[in-house]
Image: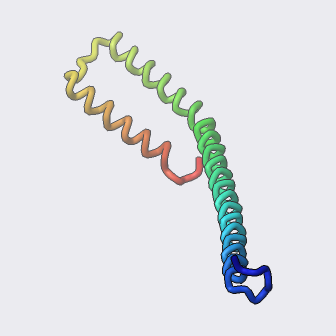
Amino acid sequence: MGSNHPADPVVASIEKVLAAERDADRMLADCRRQADATIAAARERAAGIGRRTDARISRIHPAYLKKIEAGLVQLSQAVDAGADFASEDENMSLIANAVRRLAGKMTSDASG
């Protein structure tokens, strides 16, 4: 066994390894803090997106309810008047196009 003398190469090597381990622990702790900060910032951004999305939905929902109601009134009047309607395939195509347009409007970055 080597002596505990500071010049002992075994002691110096162990101290060097322990110092490197402390440095690694500090760097790991720093990385964890940075990761936590990044995650917190991302969560805050996501929460902001959620709040803006909810606000947009709240603004456009009543307007679309009015449009739907008006469309139902028109449809009811057309049925009462004996209107001839398109085939089921044509109706499905119209519905699919309307859904795409509505989805585009609801997900666009434009305010309001």
Where residue 10 appears, as percent x and y from the top left, is: 68, 81
From this viewpoint, which residue is outermost toward the bottom?
A: 7
Across the whole image, how many numbered discs are drawn on residues?
A: 0
From this viewpoint, which residue is outermost toward the right?
A: 5
At x 37%, y 40%, the residue is 100
Where residue 81 appears, as percent x and y from the top left, is: 32, 12
Where residue 56 appears, as percent x and y from the top left, is: 60, 42
Vertical arrangement, residue 45 with respect to residue 87, above or below: below
Left or right of 85 on screen, residue 100? right
Q: What colouring does the structure picture have? A: rainbow
At x 70%, y 73%, the residue is 18
The quarter of the picture where residue 90 lies is top left
The quarter of the picture where residue 95 lies is top left
Vertical arrangement, residue 87 with respect to residue 1, above or below: above
Where residue 49 appears, as percent x and y from the top left, is: 61, 49
Toward the viewer: 38 or 100? Answer: 38
Left or right of 12 on screen, residue 81? left
Toward the viewer: 42 or 12? Answer: 12
At x 53%, y 53%, the residue is 109
From this viewpoint, which residue is outermost toward the front?
A: 1
Quarter of the image that includes the N terminus? bottom right
Toward the viewer: 31 or 22? Answer: 22
At x 62%, y 39%, the residue is 54
